[in-house]
Image: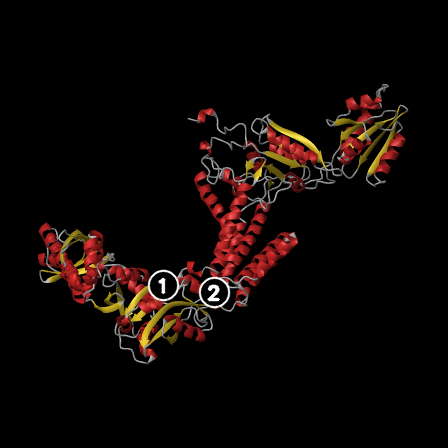
């Protein structure tokens, strides 16, 4: 309940906020009745307040004979589409922080909140983390409303549902579950909702926070949710029967669930010819294995099982290794670590000094390291190939997850040679097969195998009839007419 | 407890190197080996392909070096070599072993045992006899075409086996299997140095290697060499020829043909005295330097007969020569063993010496000349018609 006296209200709210400097309040007296409005100037737009409130009061109310019920008069006639009433101080403050202006009338225990938010974010710009050549170029922004709009304008189906939740004790972040009602499995939505409601944290600053709560208790390096800043990918996923979480102030949405094959796909795959994209898909699968296995395989073969290597190659490798002081395993580890350092610094460094990184990377870690006799040239080639293959995938969590397995394979190979390598491969495949999200196996539809139109290879669009059957309740992608 | 286990696992990585662990640069990769007999001892020379970096030409190019050691047996000689070599000898990539024929005449069972028993050695290398030359010298002849000599020899022997049929590449496993099989004897190709080798290094470099005739073994001992014709006959019967070129005479000129897809079948007749040999194949005309109308089917048939005759001669030659050496390299005994087990067991001991030379072979060759090449007439014919 709010206080009846306006002075008390002002005193209470300013005290609640520790007399912060961005609180603005003003008391107006109309026909001996006092009304007061409060807003936070850091999140509100002065123009809007003048337009919607001040002008209105000066033009209309002052000329009219005011009725006894000033509160209802104001509530019904202020020209603003976002008008709500607040009953508690908590609500009032949430509205103030969201950029609303709250109006209090003497002797009333309610407050009117009108939307006077200022735009504090950039416009819709091109996606930077998931670049594509052909396809829509827009990306999600920090503005929640815009993000919802980017999805809504693509899918005009009334079955596209937005369900809002507020997470975070202090940040009170809005999280919207987006799904297409007649495709998506309700069980999954209910589970997500339950999980979101259980989150008790002081702040959510990015969808990454939510992601960790949703995948609580998992023991794997592989991501099981896709995070993407592309609205087209979000819409593709929605049409596939997945749910999309949009978190306020985050340009990255979460797509639930993320399956293994989704990380081998790119939204661009859907915009190009199926025949051509299939070659790219095969390359992606190949580089998935290269990036994990190659360093381990090299160490296993050259230090334990030299018989497998052909004569000429072995001699060439042996001559290259002449004079290198470290064991192959250490050599490989040095290169892997230095590449990761290079990559990390390249991400952090401002663009202006990016050229320096290129020189250091190419010369110092490549050519000079070989000339100095610290590593052999073939190791540079191996690490180069491994690293490039690893960067083929757009999802940063997937790329970073592969990194761990690369090192695990390297260790296993250095310990037991080809036997260790194969044992590790067995563990790796078993691990992948055992993962699941809400009963959906991670490797669907590869294992357990069933025929799917868009697994490793993609059929032409007009032949893609069915969605994943264990994900959706409505399997038909194409209409009945096409299915003959 | 959990921490202890993790620490123990982490420590395991530090002790890599106890089991089968070898760094490449600590290995001396042996690609070729030559075994001679000297002063009643084995003189073993090994060719190491990754001795040091050849800075002057190319960083990645390998330099070869030959180490020599002596001993009563192969492992003893290798042990002596390992005293001089700074790296661990690694026999996993051995591609060629050259055995001097002096040693082969005394028997190869001594060295064969080690090569078969030692798990580290690869079993698919090629064994070659060095005819009239020391095996060590063959190994040290560097071919200007190849990076390392063992590869030269290896390629020489496989290409000649594939294309001319003059010789035959025999992997070590085949050699041993034939040696140990009942009713069969093994053969090995031989190699000679083209020039007499003196001690002068220059001479060694300028001389080159040439594949020579097939050597015939009886059990583990070399008993003799086949002639050129007989060598080709054996190759045909052993089905190791992909294609061979053959010259036949015609109307005062010569016709060169290329014979492909040769296939041979051996069959024992009921009387156990006769063996039918059926050879089929196709021929392609390569060069005709005589006046002959090639559009005439009679002429083609005549040519085919001539090719068949000359192939038949090769085969008969090879049979008669092996009969003279009293060594059944074609596997007649094996056939007999499969055909009539009881009879073979009775004559097993005297098979090579007494029974094999008395067996009669009926050779039947069927060759089809299927292509004249890109032109129909011979050049000579066209000129004479002008």
Labelled disc at residue B24: 2
Residue B349 seen by the camera: yes
* Quadrant housing residue A94: top right
Kindly identify the residue that appears in the image at 20 percent across and 54 percent down: B342
Question: Where the C terminus of chain B falls, by quadrant?
Answer: bottom left
Labelled disc at residue A80: none
* Quadrant housing residue A147: top right
Q: Secondary structure at mark 2?
A: helix
Left or right: where does residue A421 sit relative to residue B341?
right
Q: Secondary structure at mark 1?
A: helix
Residue labelled with disc 1: B116
Residue B148 seen by the camera: no
The residue lying furthest to the right in this view is A32
Give the image location of residue A71, x and y in percent: 83, 23
* Quadrant housing residue A460: top left
Kindly identify the residue that appears in the image at 44 percent across and 27 percent down: A482
Left or right: where does residue A27 sit relative to residue B99?
right
Left or right: where does residue B165 sit relative to residue B69?
left
Q: Foreground residue, B113 or A362?
A: B113
Give the image location of residue B194, x and y in percent: 26, 73
Do the residues marked 2 and 1 share a common chain?
A: yes
Chain for mark 2?
A: B
Instruction: State which tag comes first along the sequence, 2 or 1.
Output: 2
Which one is closest to the eye, mark 2 or mark 1? 1
Structural distance between the alpha carbons of marks 2 and 1: 24 Å
Question: Around disc 1, counting alpha carbons within 10 Å, would you say few (fewer than 14), some (14 to 19), or many (20 or more)?
Answer: some
Chain for mark 1?
A: B
Left or right: where does residue A92 sit relative to residue A185?
right
Kindly identify the residue that appears in the image at 51 percent across and 31 percent down: A469
Give the image location of residue B215, x and y in percent: 24, 67
Give the image location of residue B117, x and y in percent: 38, 63
Q: What sort of colour scheme is used for the picture?
A: secondary structure
């Amino acid at each position: 309940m709010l206080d009846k006296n306006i002075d008390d209200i002002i005193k209470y709210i300013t005290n609640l906020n520790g007399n912060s400097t961005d609180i603005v309040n003003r008391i107006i007296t109309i026909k001996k009745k006092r009304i007061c409005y409060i807003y936070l100037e850091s999140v509100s737009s002065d123009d809007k307040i003048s337009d919607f409130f001040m002008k209105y009061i000066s033009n209309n109310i002052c000329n009219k004979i005011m009725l006894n019920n000033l509160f209802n008069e104001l509530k019904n006639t202020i020209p603003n589409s976002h008008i709500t009433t607040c009953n508690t101080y908590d609500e009032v403050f949430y509205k103030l922080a969201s950029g609303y202006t709250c109006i209090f009338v003497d002797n009333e225990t309610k407050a009117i909140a009108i939307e006077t938010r200022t735009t504090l974010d950039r416009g819709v710009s091109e996606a930077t983390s998931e670049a594509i050549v052909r396809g829509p170029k827009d990306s999600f922004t920090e503005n929640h409303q815009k993000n919802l709009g980017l999805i809504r304008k693509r899918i005009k189906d009334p079955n596209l549902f937005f369900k809002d939740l507020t997470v975070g004790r202090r940040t009170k972040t809005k999280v919207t579950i987006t799904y297409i009602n007649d495709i998506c499995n309700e069980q999954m939505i209910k589970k997500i909702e339950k999980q979101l409601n259980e989150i008790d944290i002081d702040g959510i600053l990015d969808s990454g926070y939510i992601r960790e709560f949703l995948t609580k208790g998992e023991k794997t390096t592989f991501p099981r949710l896709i995070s993407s800043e592309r609205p087209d990918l979000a819409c593709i996923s929605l049409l596939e029967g997945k749910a999309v979480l949009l978190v306020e102030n985050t340009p990255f949405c979460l797509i639930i669930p993320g399956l293994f094959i989704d990380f081998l796909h790119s939204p661009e795959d859907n915009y190009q010819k199926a025949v051509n994209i299939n070659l790219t898909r095969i390359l992606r699968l190949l580089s998935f294995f290269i990036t994990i296995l190659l360093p381990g395989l090299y160490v296993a073969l050259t230090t334990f099982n030299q018989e497998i290597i052909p004569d000429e190659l072995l001699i060439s490798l042996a001559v290259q290794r002449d004079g290198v002081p470290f064991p192959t395993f250490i050599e490989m580890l040095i290169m892997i670590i230095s590449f990761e350092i290079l990559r990390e610094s390249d991400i952090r460094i401002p663009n202006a000094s990016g050229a320096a990184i290129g020189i250091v990377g190419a010369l110092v870690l490549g050519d000079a390291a070989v000339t100095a006799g610290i590593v052999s040239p073939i190791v540079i080639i191996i690490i180069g190939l491994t690293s490039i293959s690893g960067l083929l995938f757009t999802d940063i969590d997937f790329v970073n997850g592969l990194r761990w397995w690369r090192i695990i394979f390297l260790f296993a190979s250095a310990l037991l040679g080809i036997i260790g390598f194969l044992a590790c491969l067995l563990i790796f495949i078993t691990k992948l097969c055992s993962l699941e999200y809400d009963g959906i196996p991670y490797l669907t539809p590869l294992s357990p195998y069933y025929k799917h139109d868009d697994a490793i290879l993609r059929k032409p669009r007009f032949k893609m009839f069915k969605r994943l059957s264990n994900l959706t309740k409505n399997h038909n992608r194409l209409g009945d007419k096409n299915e003959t | 407890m959990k921490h202890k286990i993790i620490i123990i696992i982490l420590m395991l990585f530090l002790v890599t190197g106890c089991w089968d662990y070898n760094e490449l640069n600590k290995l001396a990769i042996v690609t070729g080996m030559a075994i001679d007999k000297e002063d009643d001892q084995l003189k073993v020379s090994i060719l190491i392909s990754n001795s040091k970096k050849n800075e002057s030409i190319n960083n990645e190019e390998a330099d070869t070096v030959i180490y020599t050691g002596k001993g009563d047996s192969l492992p003893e000689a290798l042990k002596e070599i390992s005293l001089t070599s700074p790296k661990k000898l690694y026999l996993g990539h051995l591609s060629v072993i050259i055995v001097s024929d002096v040693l082969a005449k005394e028997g190869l069972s001594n060295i064969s045992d080690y090569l078969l028993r030692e798990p580290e050695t690869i079993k698919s290398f090629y064994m070659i006899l060095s005819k009239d030359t020391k095996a060590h010298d063959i190994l040290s002849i560097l071919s200007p075409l190849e990076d390392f000599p063992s590869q030269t020899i290896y390629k020489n022997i496989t290409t000649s086996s594939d294309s001319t049929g003059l010789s035959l590449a025999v992997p070590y496993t085949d050699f041993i299997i034939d040696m140990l099989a009942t009713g069969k004897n093994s053969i090995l190709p031989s190699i000679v140095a083209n020039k007499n080798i003196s001690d002068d290094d220059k001479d060694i470099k300028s001389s080159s290697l040439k594949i020579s005739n097939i050597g015939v073994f009886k059990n583990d001992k070399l008993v003799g060499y086949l002639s050129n014709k007989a060598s080709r006959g054996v190759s045909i019967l052993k089905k190791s020829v992909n294609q061979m070129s053959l010259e036949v005479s015609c109307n005062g000129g010569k016709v060169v043909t290329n014979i492909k897809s040769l296939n041979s079948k051996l069959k024992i007749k009921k009387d156990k005295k006769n063996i039918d040999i059926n050879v089929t194949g196709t021929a392609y005309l390569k060069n005709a330097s005589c006046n002959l109308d090639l559009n005439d089917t009679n002429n083609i048939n005549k040519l085919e007969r001539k090719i068949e005759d000359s192939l038949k001669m090769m085969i008969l030659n090879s049979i008669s020569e092996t009969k003279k050496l009293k060594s059944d390299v074609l596997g007649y005994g094996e056939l007999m063993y499969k055909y009539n087990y009881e009879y073979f067991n009775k004559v097993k001991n005297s098979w090579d010496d007494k029974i094999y030379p008395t067996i009669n072979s009926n050779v039947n060759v069927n060759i089809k000349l299927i292509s004249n090449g890109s032109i129909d007439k011979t050049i000579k014919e066209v000129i004479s018609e002008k």
